[in-house]
Amino acid sequence: MKKVFALLIATIMTITTLTTSSFSTFAATKADVPEAKLDEALDITVKPLDNSEFQEITDLSELDNKDLWSVKYTPETTGWYEFDFDTEYKCSPIEDKDSGFSFAMCFTVLVDDKNNDCAMGYSYYGQNSEEGSEDIFGMAATPAPSVTAELTAGKTYYLLAMNVSASDYTSKLTVKNHTHEMIAASEKASVSYYFGVGDIDSTEGYVGRACSCEYCEYKEADITYPAVKSIKIKDVVYNGKKQTPKVTIKLTNGKALNSDNYKVKYYTNKKIGYATADVTFKGNYTGSALLQFKILPKKTALVSAKGAKKSANLKWKKKAGVTGYQIQYSTNKNFKNAKKVNVKGAKKVTKTIKKLKAGKKYYFRIRTCKKAYGEKFYSKWSKVKTAKIKK
């Protein structure tokens, strides 16, 4: 399922928690959906569907056997087409006395034979019942939810149409060739990212011309602002000062985004633990990104590792401001299958590792540890010391 359908489902689920509406739909399954012909109108009827069923929808593929489909269409030539409703949506507003809102909504999704959505149209309107004209969610009334998209010759497409309403909705639907009416247009590239919450959501921007049709996304760009591909920030080492590591932003064209297009603010960026970088985009880009990085304790140095009878005696430099140390040792120089020993307290600087294999060469390294935010934060490893264990 594409992001656009998932986001719309989430929006409607939020909205329907404010209403007591039923959910309406076209009465045809995908297998039985009628076939549209170019420039021939079909009568479309929307019938009620229980809202609880709608709440269970998470993927377009779940809708194949439900009565949600209006028409299918197979173009003879590749080009732009529009699936056009001849009336504005005729939903009866649903009154919610508790919230003081009235609300109605209709939307369509055009998909291919694999249920990949290639276009979407939607319209919804709500107003404050007391004031009589205030739109909810910042959305004004719009015409019928027509869809315009570029279709491939010989490929079959399906129109899925849904309606949130207290009553039926009827209209005529016609598939037409779409002719672009171009006007000067521009759009900033958008970026949205929050660490730990999915991938980067970014779209490219442009300066050029675009179709003036409300439901067409066709553009001819003279200048294009690439979408953002990656946003990274590196962990840093504690130095007693506020840390401001560089944020690196790469675009889909492989280049780095110029710093004129964003600014960064840092929070909780002095003590060992987690720190935050808040990126706000500007210039040719809009949106925000929230990044997390670590401030790690300073590392220590392993002074010596001396072999003894089936043991090794280690000594390292003391580091203030830590809660302990962690030693790692192995008979493999790459520390494969290595064992670890934790040492509590910053003041302790020696440790005897026992139960080692006599005659074997061991590799040792150490790092500092600091407990913060209920977690342990470790420094980078020290340089390696070796010792041959005595018999």
Image (cartoon, rainbow, N blue to C red):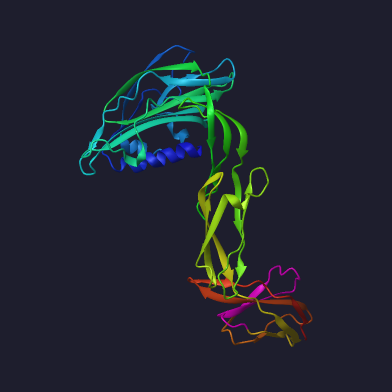
Could you tell me residue 149's position as x and y percent? 52, 25
Could you tell me residue 77's position as x and y percent? 59, 16
The residue depicted at 55 percent of the width and 24 percent of the height is: 150
> From this viewpoint, is residue 193 visible?
no
Taking 48 as reference, is 334 above or below it?
below
Could you tell me residue 63's position as x and y percent? 43, 31
> Which image quarter: residue 313?
bottom right
Taking 335 as reference, is 160 above or below it?
above
For residue 324: magenta? yes
Please state if 130 lies on the left or on the right of 55 as rendered.
left
The residue depicted at 36 percent of the width and 23 percent of the height is: 27
The residue depicted at 57 percent of the width and 66 percent of the height is: 294
Q: Nearer the viewer, residue 150 or 70?
A: 150
Q: Which residues are magenta?
A: 319-342
Q: Residue furthest top?
A: 40
Please state if 125 lies on the left or on the right of 110 as rendered.
left
For residue 144: magenta? no
Looking at the rendered image, the quarter that the C terminus falls into is bottom right
